[in-house]
Image: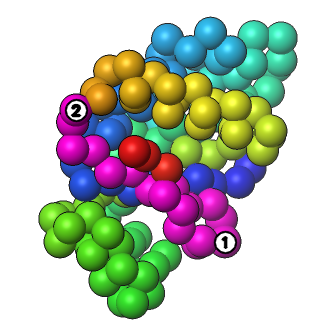
């Protein structure tokens, strides 16, 4: 499994993603534990997405991002606090489809909200995702 991190200027990003993934027709909720929901494709017996339900702690951020990367994130977020949460995924092509669909849903839900979302794949390369 690979990791994708969502970074945002608001905690609402997790709320939006949670709503999206619960209703996403290409995934089926499988199970959960205290900090993760597990989703699979309807015709598969393997989990496809692990949705981690808590934001990364300052210690996790320090471990995964250099001080320069954190300063860069802060600048992109207009010096507001930023929030990071992770999902793990199995299939990169499926992840691409999921991200495109999530972006489309965000456009429907919050076209006027001042929401900034970045994503980082396992190589820590940070990419602009939304708007």
Front residue of 85/92: it is 92
Q: Answer with the quarter of the image where residue 114 lies.
A: top left
Front residue of 89/129: it is 129
- Residue lying furthest left in this view? 80
Q: Residue at x 53, y 67 (%)?
A: 126
Q: Residue at x 34, y 46 (%)?
A: 54
| Secondary structure of the residue carrying numbered label 1 | loop
Estimate how packed mark 1 is, as few (under 14), some (14 to 19) or many (20 or more) residues with alpha carbons within 10 Å.
Answer: few
Indicate whether residue 43 is drawn in magenta.
no
Q: Which residues are magenta?
A: 112-128
- Residue 131 vs 43, above or below: the answer is below
Q: Name the residue beneath numbered marker 2.
A: 112
Q: Position of residue 92 (x, y in %)?
A: 78, 44
Q: Would you say residue 16 is visible in this rendering? A: yes
Asked if labels 1 and 2 touch by Cβ distance under 8 angstroms, the answer is no
Q: Name the residue beneath numbered marker 1.
A: 123
Q: Position of residue 45 (x, y in %)?
A: 82, 19
Q: Position of residue 105 (x, y in %)?
A: 45, 22
Q: Position of residue 97 (x, y in %)?
A: 70, 31
- Residue 113 vs 129, above or below: the answer is above
Indicate whether residue 124 is drawn in magenta.
yes
Q: Answer with the quarter of the image where residue 49 lies.
A: top right
Mark 2 and mark 1: span between their CA atoms? Answer: 31 Å
Q: Answer with the quarter of the image where residue 14 lies.
A: top left
Q: How is the image coloured?
A: rainbow
- Residue 93 vs 25, above or below: the answer is below
90 horizontally vs 27: left or right: right
Q: Give the number of the disc on residue 8.
A: none
Q: Earlier in the sequence, mark 2 or mark 1?
A: 2
Front residue of 17/103: it is 103
Viewport quadrant of the C terminus: top left
| Secondary structure of the residue carrying numbered label 2 | loop
């Amino acid at each position: 499994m690979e990791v994708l991190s969502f970074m945002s200027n608001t905690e609402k990003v997790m709320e939006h993603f949670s709503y999206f993934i619960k209703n996403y027709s290409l995934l089926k909720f499988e199970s959960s534990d205290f900090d993760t929901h597990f989703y699979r494709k309807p015709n598969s017996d393997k989990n496809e997405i692990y949705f981690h339900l808590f934001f990364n702690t300052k210690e996790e951020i320090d471990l995964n991002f250099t001080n320069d990367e954190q300063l860069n994130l802060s600048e992109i977020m207009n010096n507001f606090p930023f929030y990071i949460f992770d999902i793990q995924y199995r299939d990169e092509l499926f992840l691409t489809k999921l991200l495109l669909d999530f972006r489309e849903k965000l456009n429907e839900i919050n076209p006027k909200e001042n929401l900034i979302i970045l994503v980082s794949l396992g190589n820590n390369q940070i990419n602009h995702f939304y708007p």
